[in-house]
Structure formats: structure tokens, C-alpha cells
Image (tube, grey):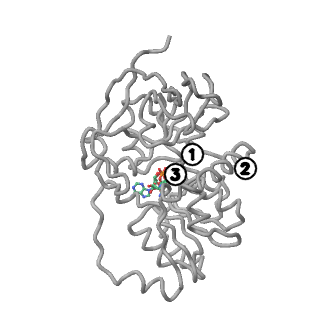
Amino acid sequence: MQPRFYKKLIAKQLGQDFKSAVEIVELRIPEPAAHEIVIRNQFAGVNAGFDTLLCRGEVPYANLTPPFDLGVEAVGEVIAVGSDVTDIKIGDAVATTVRGGGYREYQAIAANLAIKVRQATPDILTLMPTGVSAMVALEQVGEMGSGEVVLVTAAAGGTGHIAVQLAKLAGNHVIGTCGSDAKSEFLKKLGCDRVINYKQENVDEVLKGEYPDGINLVFECVGKEIFDICVNNLAVRGRLVVVGFISEYAYQLEAVYQPRIYSKLFWKAASVRGFLMPRYGDYIPEARDRILDLFYTGKLQVAVDSTEFKGIESVTAAVEYLLSGQNCGKVVVRF
Ligand SMILES: NC(=O)c1ccc[n+]([C@@H]2O[C@H](COP(=O)([O-])OP(=O)(O)OC[C@H]3O[C@@H](n4cnc5c(N)ncnc54)[C@H](OP(=O)(O)O)[C@@H]3O)[C@@H](O)[C@H]2O)c1
């Protein structure tokens, strides 16, 4: 028998960190409207950077007023369908990528927003929207070609490990940065040509010494000094895509005083470009189909971090774990 109530995580107020903003609430499991389905979420992906910024009120395009729902991607099983829904049935496995749909045990959602998948496994959460973001950022913003030098920072993370493989599949020489020996081994197995463990090697010295012509494309997730090093090592006509700046999410942005960035870019005709998935929404359906195909045909390996987070009560710990930088692959919560 299905339970009658479920739990979800909300931001009850804005706060400096995720923990101080959130609260678990219990609600009755909804009935679907005619165009809706009800899903029992089995796994949710953790986007600790976005989650934290949302709870701090620092996501300008969302501009939410508490209370609001949290979490984005989830994968689960359909338990009820509305009377107008014809292409999804009870028992189907579906993925969803709607803001507010992740950190909850059940969700009612318009059927056209659910994506049917073969099985409700956590692997899917490395692809949607994470892998799709990596693909769109590299291809549309970074204008990724082949035969270039591509640098991925936080390369062993949820987004980074997909970016590394997409850059390799496109025929590039790929450098990945990470912060542990275990992650270095993981990246070598994925085919990364040069792994830099930034806790053991000086990234700037490695790039200047081994890549004197510079880096053609940087997929930059970390920020602060790593961002500076990447900008300083861009090649002529190099492109740096700002995918994120995770080193700053838990803190106030550091104010820096130095000559304006155009002095670094101009002489190389290089560029720094921002990427935000919601601003590239029109590319999602095609990229999603292609990334699922790469996965189902065995061309893309996906990694889910092995630390187990179980239940809605564990979401805060999962967010803090990701922000501590320990994870290898995508951090996932199981319900
Ligand atoms: N723009 C978009 O639409 C979009 C979409 C998805 C993700 N993102 C961004 O992509 C980046 C990666 O996100 P993710 O969810 O996949 O996380 P993740 O890469 O799985 O985890 C974060 C990783 O960042 C690395 N890191 C380096 N310096 C760090 C520091 N000072 N503090 C914390 N972590 C540090 C850590 O690995 P190492 O120490 O081994 O490097 C850590 O494992 C984030 O910046 C995120 O905001 C952006």
C-alpha cells in the first residue's frame, strides 16, 4: 500500500549557508491533475553550489522568496497518471529536471516535463542535467573543435568527469585538475591525457612548462586562483568558459584589485565566456538525446560518488560533503 504522506525539503528563510535556511516538511501525497503524473523519487542529484546560492538569495534569475522548494534533478517511478496522459504509464521510470523537484520523496509534475528512461538508476543523474550542461557549455559556448588542448577543472566531479570524456570523444588533448591521488587515477582511467593534482603540483608551472602555446579551451568550475591561472595560460584565440566558481560559493566573493581583464585577453584575442544552463535551454533536448545515446551505447562512462546519503534528512550532509571537495563523480541522495 502506498503511504499517504511524504517529506520534502524547503528553504524556510534565506541564510548564509544551506543548513541554516532549510527545513523538512510533511505533506499529503498529491493526486495527479489531468495532465500530470505523480512520481516516487528514488534518487536526487545534488548541486551544492546552486543550492547554497539559492538559499543565500544570490541566484538573480530565480529571485525566489521563501518558502520555496529545493533540489532539481530526480529519477524515480511513476505511481499515478492523470486522465489525459497517454504516453506514460504507472511503473515507468522517469527523470525530471525541474527546479524544486529534487529534494522530495514524491512529486506531481506535468507529464510533458518527465523524460522516460530505461531504469531509475542514479547513473541517469550524471547525465541530466549535469552531462547536458557539460555538453552545451563545451560545444555552444566553448566552440569545442578537435585537435585542441582542453583543460577541465574539478575534472573528477559530477560535471567535470563528463566534460573530460566529451572533450576526448571530440578528439582533443585533455588536461584535468583534481585534488587527490584517487581522483587522479580515476581521471587517467577515463582517458585524461594529463592529470594535475593541484595539491601536489603547481598548476601554473605545469601549464607554462608543458603547454607553452597555451590552452585553447578551458572548462572552468573552480574560480579564484585557478581561474586566474587559466586566464593567464589561454592560447591565442583561447576560450575560457565560466561554468562555475565553487571555491567561492560558501563565502562572500573575494574582491580583487588588479588591472582590468582586457589587458590579458586583448593581445591573445582570447575570451572569457559565461555559461548558465537555463540561458541555453533551447539546446537541451538535442543534447539530452545525444548524451543518453552515448551512455546507452557504452561510449560514456558515468561515476556516482560512493558515499551513501539516504533520506531527505541526509540532503544537508550531502550538500556540505560536495562543498568540502571530497567527492569523485556525482553526489546523489537516495530515497
Ligand atoms: N553553469 C551551469 O549551468 C552549471 C551546471 C552544472 C554545474 N555547474 C558548476 O559546475 C561546477 C561543478 O559542479 P558539480 O555539482 O558537478 O560539483 P562537483 O564537481 O561534483 O564537486 C565539486 C568539486 O570541485 C572541486 N573543488 C576545487 N576547489 C574547490 C573548493 N575550494 N571548494 C570545493 N570544491 C572544490 C572539488 O574537487 P577537486 O578538489 O578534486 O578539484 C570538488 O569535488 C560547480 O561550479 C557548479 O556550480 C554549473
Q: Residues within 10 Å of mark 2 (few under 14, many from 20)?
A: few
Amino acid at circle 2: Lys
**Mark 2, mark 1: which one is toward the viewer?**
1
- Residue carrying label 3: 157
- Residue carrying label 1: 128
Say which residue appears at 52% left-offset and 30% top-offset: 36
- Left or right of residue 247, residue 165 in this image: right
- Left or right of residue 195, residue 41 in this image: left
User: Residue 9: horizontal and vertical position, in percent?
Assistant: 35, 34
Q: Earlier in the sequence, mark 3 or mark 2?
A: 3
Say which residue appears at 34% left-offset and 49% top-offset: 54
User: Residue 321: horizontal and vertical position, in percent?
Assistant: 40, 44
Foreground pick, 298 / 173: 298
Foreground pick, 250 / 82: 82
Q: Are marks 3 and 2 in contact (CB under 8 Å)?
A: no
Q: Residues within 10 Å of mark 1 (few under 14, many from 20)?
A: many
Amino acid at circle 3: Gly
Label 1 and label 3: CA atoms lie apart by 15 Å
Label 3 and label 2: CA atoms lie apart by 18 Å
Residue 63 in the image: above or below residue 142: above
Count of labels shown? 3
- Left or right of residue 27, residue 286 in this image: right
Amino acid at circle 1: Met
Q: Earlier in the sequence, mark 1 or mark 3?
A: 1
- Residue carrying label 2: 299
